[in-house]
């Protein structure tokens, strides 16, 4: 993968802080999925542990680099979703995990350098886990760094966010994103980037997975329903069978394009009979439904209620 140019400024700032011996004990890497937070974190961990860094990068060949790449460096801890006693993966990070992490970080570094811990996704910590992490954040050990990764940092308590140095990854300029996608060999990069809402990492993944066809399917489904063809229940079944949240994302995009077309008195891609105000309400409902899919509500009922309102 080619280097992500939108990382450069953040990386240069960390290099400058290291030169001043002023690196923070806690970083919060946040922003939409697809902008390379995980790659940035891996690069940072390897660089800090490298025995022969040069030019602001890890050498890639020393003992520490080889162990880090292999995932066996004794001074690196990765914390994510654990398993319950019945072997099922948890849907949140729990207090016992944070306590084990804190105990581990209280010990001395085995290689005599940095101890680094990543919490991913940090916004999946439950309230007890977040409270347990506060003590470690307030009383950090020397040469210890916590790296929190979060797509939705607003889900973290303010007490956690305020104790971390925040690095926020934002969508790059379209020209920069297109250049990177083309260097990555993505076909029809402009269409992929539009589908992903300007997110180049998401565009790359979706182009690889053939997701652009799913986007067209959503538009065809909505246009057919607006024309009185087909049944909402059939569309619901099809959407639930394959990436429902993603299909709702594409539905919201299609409605936004419909509204834009109305502004220029053109026929929108969906030929909806709804007026602009109703389209705006439906757009908001789509996004609420996409968020609700994370919760306990039945997805079929959510989608059926939503599509029953579409005209």
Image (cartoon, grey):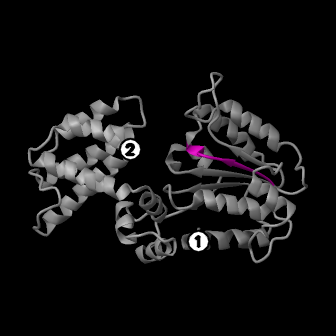
**What is the tally of numbered marks visible in this picture?**
2
Snapshot quadrant of residue 230: top left
Which residue is at a point 60% across and 51% down the rendered structure image? 149
Tell me where residue 273 appears, x and y as whole percent: 8, 51
Q: CA distance from mark 2 to mark 1?
A: 28 Å
Q: Earlier in the sequence, mark 2 or mark 1?
A: 1
Residue topped by disc 1: 2
Badge 2, how many Cα within 10 Å: few under 14, some, many 20+? few
Residue 116 painted magenta = yes
Which residue is at a point 74% across and 57% down the rendered structure image? 69
| Left or right side of 175 for 108 | right
Where the C terminus falls, by quadrant? top left
Where the N terminus falls, by quadrant? bottom right
Snapshot quadrant of residue 89: top right
* Element assignment for label 2: loop
Residue 226 painted magenta = no
| Left or right side of 180 for 62 | right
Q: Is residue 111 above or below residue 105?
A: below
Which residue is at a point 81% across and 44% down the rendered structure image? 105
Tell me where residue 301 appears, x and y as whole percent: 28, 30
On residue 292, which mark appears? none
Q: Nearer the viewer, residue 215 or 29?
A: 215
Q: Is residue 158 above or below residue 169?
A: above
Tell me where residue 253 appears, x and y as whole percent: 29, 56
Q: Is residue 176 above or below residue 212?
A: below
* Residue 163 seen in the current view: no
Tell me where residue 40 appears, x and y as whole percent: 63, 62
Residue topped by disc 2: 243
Q: Nearer the viewer, residue 247 or 258?
A: 247
Q: Give, as a single range, the part of the protein colored magenta.
A: 115-123
* Residue 255 seen in the current view: yes
């Amino acid at each position: 993968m080619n280097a992500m140019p939108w990382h450069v400024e953040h990386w240069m700032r960390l290099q400058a802080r290291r030169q001043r011996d002023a690196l923070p004990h806690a970083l919060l890497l946040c922003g939409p999925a697809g902008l390379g937070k995980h790659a940035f974190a891996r690069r940072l961990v390897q660089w800090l542990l490298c025995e022969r860094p040069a030019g602001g990068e890890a050498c890639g060949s020393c003992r520490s680099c080889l162990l880090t790449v292999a995932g066996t460096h004794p001074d690196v801890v990765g914390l994510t979703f654990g398993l319950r006693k019945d072997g099922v993966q948890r849907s949140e990070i729990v207090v016992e995990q944070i306590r084990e992490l804190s105990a581990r970080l209280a010990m001395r570094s085995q290689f005599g350098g940095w101890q680094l811990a990543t919490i991913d996704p940090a916004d999946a910590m439950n309230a007890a886990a977040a409270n347990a992490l506060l003590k470690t954040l307030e009383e950090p050990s020397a040469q210890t760094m916590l790296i929190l990764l979060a797509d939705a940092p607003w889900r973290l308590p303010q007490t956690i966010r305020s104790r971390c140095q925040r690095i926020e990854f934002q969508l790059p300029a379209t020209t920069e994103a297109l250049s990177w996608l083309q260097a990555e060999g993505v076909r029809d990069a402009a269409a992929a980037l539009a589908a992903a809402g300007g997110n180049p990492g998401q565009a790359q993944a979706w182009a690889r997975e053939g997701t652009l066809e799913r986007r067209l399917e959503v538009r065809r489904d909505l246009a057919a329903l607006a024309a009185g063809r087909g049944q909402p229940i059939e569309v619901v079944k099809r959407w639930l069978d394959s990436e429902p949240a993603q299909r709702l994302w594409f539905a919201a995009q299609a409605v936004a394009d419909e509204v834009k077309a109305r502004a220029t008195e053109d026929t929108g891609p969906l030929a909806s009979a709804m007026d602009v105000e109703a389209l705006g309400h439906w757009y908001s409902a789509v996004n609420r439904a996409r968020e609700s899919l994370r919760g306990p509500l039945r997805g079929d009922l959510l989608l059926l209620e939503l599509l029953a309102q579409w005209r």
